[in-house]
Image (cartoon, rainbow, N blue to C red):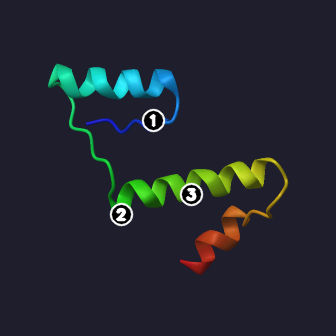
């Protein structure tokens, strides 16, 4: 199983989703807790990369677990 995040707001994204639905080879999950969590994490990572937000060092993150 693979997970792919598609921007359905673009023309190409809409076409790709329609193709996947029509092919019957994929299950499209519109909303779920996991999808929302991944999207939130990717948005936060993007902010860290742009320097708008401070990331947590890996050692501190692992020690907090």
Q: Residue at x 85, y 53 (%)?
A: 51
Q: Which residue is drawn at 60% across and 79% down?
A: 64
Where is residue 59 shown, x and y percent of the image? 68, 67
Q: What element carries label 2?
A: helix
Q: Marks 3 and 1, Cα distance to the nearest angstrom? A: 18 Å
Where is residue 38 shown, x and y percent of the image? 47, 54
In the rendered structure, the answer to whether residue 65 lies left or right of residue 52 reads left
> Closer to us: mark 3 or mark 2?
2
| Numbered mark located on residue 33 in the image | 2
Q: Which of 58 and 54 is in front in this view?
A: 54
Q: How crowded is mark 2: few (under 14 residues within 10 Å), some or many (20 or more)?
A: few
In the rendered structure, the answer to whether residue 15 lies left or right of residue 25 reads right
Which mark is first along the chain, 1 or 3?
1
In the rendered structure, the answer to whether residue 54 lies left or right of residue 58 reads right
Q: Marks 3 and 2, Cα distance to the nearest angstrom? A: 12 Å
Which mark is first along the chain, 2 or 1?
1
Q: How crowded is mark 3: few (under 14 residues within 10 Å), some or many (20 or more)?
A: few
> Closer to us: mark 3 or mark 1?
1
| Residue bearing mark 3 | 41
Disc 1 and disc 2 in contact, CB within 8 angstroms: no
| Residue bearing mark 1 | 8
Disc 3 and disc 2 in contact, CB within 8 angstroms: no
In this view, which residue lies farthest toward the right? Answer: 51
| Numbered mark located on residue 29 in the image | none
Q: Marks 1 and 2, Cα distance to the nearest angstrom? A: 18 Å
């Amino acid at each position: 199983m693979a997970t792919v995040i598609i921007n359905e707001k673009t023309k190409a994204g809409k076409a790709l989703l329609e193709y996947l639905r029509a092919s019957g080879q994929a299950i499209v999950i519109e909303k779920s807790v996991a999808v929302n969590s991944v999207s939130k994490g990717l948005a936060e990572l993007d902010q860290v990369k742009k320097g708008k937000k401070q990331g947590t060092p890996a050692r501190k993150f692992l020690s907090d677990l």
